[in-house]
Amino acid sequence: MRTPATPPGASSPRRWLIAGLKLAVVAAVVWFVSQTVREAWRELARRELALSLAPALGAGAMIVLAQAPMAWFWRRTLVALGEPAPLGGAIKAFYLSQIGKYVPGKASVVLIRTERLLDAVRRDDHDAFEAACGRTVAAAVFYETLTHIAVGSLIAAALTVATVEGDPNTRLGLMALSLALAVACLTPTLPPVFSRLLKKVAKAPSSEVARERRRLTYGLSALGAVCAAVSWGLIGVVVWLSAVSVGAAGWGDFSRWPLWVLAAALPTVAGFVSLLPAGLVVREALSLVILAPALGEADALAVTIAVRLVWVVTELCVCGSLLASGAIGAARRVRSPSRKWP
């Protein structure tokens, strides 16, 4: 006898449990950092926050550079999954999709990358290609993102012991959080696990899942780990330059690079798991917890604000530039219809 299907509006106890755990994590983070935030705002009000242009521009350039390894790895994952996306079109789609993370949920990133690839790769059987491309892009996006996040969690766990100053309990708690996030994010990236998830979530045919399982190898995972490690190292430079831009650090403080990497990795990972748009609030809260013992509450808050500001402005500028260049190229093709474009 077949069990009746669960109505779409019904919620299982497991779903309620997961939602409750997420809410508990967010509540705990807010509670633990509330005292630090209040003190930081009081101290920040007593100092003048000025942003130095040169290091801020350097931080913006490093953001673009830090995203390049993962953009290349995402395209490499597409190729491994049987979608020979052009390098230029894939890289452009990757950078344009970064603005999608500011929208609740992760679907916007997938939709933007799919749309840009459809624009870059024209096929006669457009409808069939669009359906296949959407599944492949979604799989590659989650594989690339989870790889980046998992490596960031492992880096954060390794750096917490040697980097975080102050209360030992805080250090222990951050390390436990890093390891828990590492396990949660690393497990789905293992090729056999990812293939099962793909079959369950994407409802792909068994033959297609088996084919993609053969393509997602441990060698590809190792390549992604190297790209992610390089990316996190460069993101640490972003935090350092942002600290220099608000006077919270000097040019000679690059020696504290492990602290800057930790202040980037753990907040970003926790923000991703929270599913809030761009990790809003969660990233800032954990950044304060990590930086405040070393820099003081006011400087930690200034750096946190500077990183968020520079990051958003940089991604807006990059997206605007790419869209403008695309519009100019389209206008030229309209004016020169006889010219053959690749």
Image (spheres, rainbow, N blue to C red):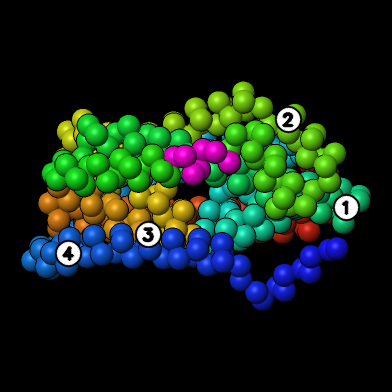
Q: How far is mark 4 from mark 2, CA to CA? A: 49 Å
At label 3, the amino acid type is Val
Per the image, the residue denoted by label 1 is: 128
Per the image, the residue denoted by label 3 is: 25
Tell me the tag on residue 215.
2
Point out residue 262 in the picture as x, y percentages from the top left corner. Answer: 31, 40
Left or right, residue 291 beside residue 69: left
Tell me the tag on residue 258.
none
Residue drawn at (57%, 58%) of the image? 106
Q: How far is mark 4 from mark 1, CA to CA? A: 55 Å
Look at the numbered discs 4 and 3 and tell me whether their residues touch, using CB distance below 8 Å: no
How dense is the environment of label 1, judged by Cα within 10 Å: few (below 14), some, or many (20 and up)? Answer: few
Q: Main secondary structure of the magenta part?
A: helix
Residue drawn at (83%, 42%) of the image? 206
User: Between disc 4 and disc 1, whose residue precedes?
Assistant: 4
Q: What SS does tag 4 mark? A: helix
Viewer-nearest residue: 150 or 102: 150
